[in-house]
Image: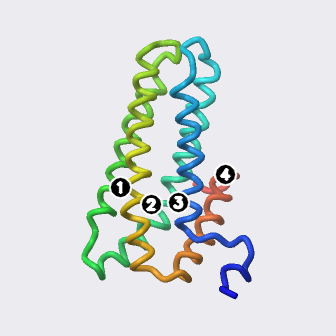
Amino acid sequence: MPRAKARGEMKDAIGLLKEDHTKVRALLGELEKSSEKATTRRAELLEEIERELKIHTTIEEEIFYPAFREAAEKKDDLRLYYEAIEEHHVVDLVMPEIKSTNPASEQFGAKAKVLKDLIEHHAEEEENEMFPKARKIMSSEELVELGTQIQSRKQDLQSGLAT
């Protein structure tokens, strides 16, 4: 039997990151469908999305992206790494704007849609380009080890113990 099954619930880095993408997509979909009258719910959703994004981008930037970059240097394909970093930066620019917008306004809905589009584009690019490339240039063992690091760091971030 493959070692992954023997380890039970051990997931590799890519599986964990895809789970995060699924969760954030669902939250963004709920935010986009929310009514201008549901200002409290919109604010709660935005807060949850921001929290999830901070944790996700932190683990990507601290753990997954550096490992990908190191492996990609050998293959001379750093474009995906640099694009992903820049896409995180764009979301960091958009988030304060949407947070400062009245949740009851049409402008909030428009900004929420733009945020959703940005994040969906980023997740799709990772899932369709970066992750398949990572599977080619990193071993299964490396990806499982990165998954272990990601799970540990994510728990720290969720607990608020780490900065």
Q: Nearer the viewer, residue 60 or 138?
A: 138
The residue that disc 4 covers is: 158
Question: Residue 31's image quarter?
Answer: top right
> Could you say where residue 64 lies in the image, as x and y percent from the top left?
47, 67
Does residue 115 sit above or below 13 in this rendering?
above
Label located before the other in sequence (2 or 1): 2
Q: Which mark is residue 59?
A: 3
**Numbered circle sitting on residue 74:** none
In the image, what residue type sits under mark 1? Ile
Q: CA distance from mark 4 to mark 2?
A: 16 Å
For mark 3, give the secondary structure.
Answer: helix
How would you rate the neighbour count of disc 3 (Cα within 10 Å): few for under 14, some for 14-19, many for 20 or more? many
Q: Are marks 1 and 4 in contact (CB under 8 Å)?
A: no
Q: Which numbered disc flags the more N-terminal residue, 3 or 4?
A: 3
Q: CB atoms at circles 2 and 1 under 8 Å apart?
A: yes
Q: Amino acid at mark 4?
A: Gln
Which quadrant would the C terminus be assigned to in this image? bottom right
N-terminal of the pair, mark 4 or mark 2, is 2
Read off the residue under disc 2: 61
The amino acid on which the numbered mark 2 sits, given as a three-letter code, is: Glu
Q: Residue at x 56, y 17 (%)?
A: 35
Residue 138: % across, % down: 44, 80
Q: How far is disc 1 from disc 3 in space, using C-alphas?
A: 12 Å
